[in-house]
Image: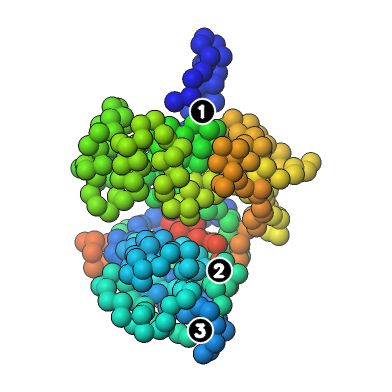
Amino acid sequence: MNSEEKGKEEMEEESTSQIDFADMDWSYYSDTYGIKGQIKEQVDDFIVKELASHDTGEEGEHLVIKLRKQNMTTMNAVDKLSKMLHISRNRIGYAGNKDKRAVTEQYISVQGVEEEEVRNVYTDEFDIEVVGKGGKIGLGNLSANRFEITVRDLKLPENDIKERSQKIVDELDGKMPNYFGDQRFGSTRPVTHQVGHHILKGDFEEAVWTYIAKPYDEEYKSIRKVREDLWETREVEGAAERFPEKFQYEKTLLYHLTKNPEDYQGAIKRLPEGLQTLFIHAYQSWIFNKTLSRLIEEGWYQEEYDIPLVGYKTEFNDNKPDQIMQEVLEEEGIERDDFRLSEMPELRSEGSLRRSFADFRNFNIIKATEDDLNMAKNKMTVSFDLPKGCYATVFLREIMKN
């Protein structure tokens, strides 16, 4: 950890870094009491398909491929496919990350690979289908996502489930708070934004150990025990072998520290570039959510307004959203200039904007019926469309209000 001054100055520095990151109780926009319930009890309870069109034909540097996966992040699927094709993952483009615990369908592009090579990829972890040839796929290629989601473990009668859900949707009137979903921060272990906070403060040691070892009750007991021990001891030797194979990023950090003790910044640089960037983006998302939540709590609503995703080029105006965001940053001991990341300039962020409220369309209650997984409970299956970058869990959060 970075050396600090003794006495009062040290205590003040420590107090600004001890942020309560567990609080994700964002304000609701609708007032009607929710239906409660649980989602993602089964992988196929959560289905998402990209609504995107790609110009494909027989020409182009990239193969356009439809990727179907379940119980796997987009990043992991891309990593595995790049290894199977023996190419850099930078040659694979995609429009957005899809949920891990879900059945998802999206388009990816692969540069400099023949169709026959893709057809020779055999795996039971995901399905791929060549659509044609075209340009590289990125964020601009996605217009919306279509969701079909089952909410289970509902205590209400079937008719009450439908009526209350529809009442909330009518109350929202086609708009929802455009929060980032919990998965942005880590659904089971919400540490991604915490790592970003420590990187912004230049505390790379705390960033590494937060990612590796900070324990949360929601994890499996065996993994939680490993993290709890490491959180206390911070003993690197032999620690990588204590994690199962799927915890590849924890292992990467620990292997680096075994060979290069105290090189915490170097350890972070061993992680995939996309994950390093995500740490900073997740923290920007955290600030955005806290700002929007306070605005909603105070009755603020401007559906067309863009709230900053703060960076070093963000300019604050004399309006309520910017005033609230400045308060949040001050509370967390972060300044705009911290996003220059002088020690890791490859991660610097000048900032951008995000719409405060998002549209949802085509909401439909497909069915409400007896829950086959939970005795004496009911379930409801709904479908709806959301623009790119918006979270289905945020929309359902208004309906469920757990």
**Residue located 30% across and 45% down the image:** 251
- Count numbered badges in the picture: 3
Give amino acid for label 2: Gly
Would you name the residue on which mark 3 appears?
A: 133
**Residue located 36% across and 71% down the image:** 85
- The reply to whether the C-beta atoms of the residues labelled 2 and 1 are less than 8 Å apart is no
Location of residue 315 with respect to 370 vertically, above or below: above
Location of residue 287 with respect to 50 vertically, above or below: above
**Residue located 51% across and 28% down the image:** 17
One can see residue 182 in this view = no
Task: Give the SS element for disc 1.
Answer: helix
| Residue in the foreground of this view, choosing between 51 and 179 | 51
Would you name the residue on which mark 1 appears?
A: 17
* Disc on the earlier residue, 1 or 3: 1
* Disc on the earlier residue, 2 or 1: 1
Q: Closer to the camera: disc 1 or disc 3?
A: 3
Give amino acid for label 1: Ser
Q: Residues within 10 Å of mark 2 (few under 14, many from 20)?
A: some
- Tell me the CA gap for discs 3 and 2: 15 Å
The x and y percentages for residue 290 are 57, 43
Would you name the residue on which mark 2 appears?
A: 138
The x and y percentages for residue 94 are 49, 68
- Tell me the CA gap for discs 2 and 1: 36 Å
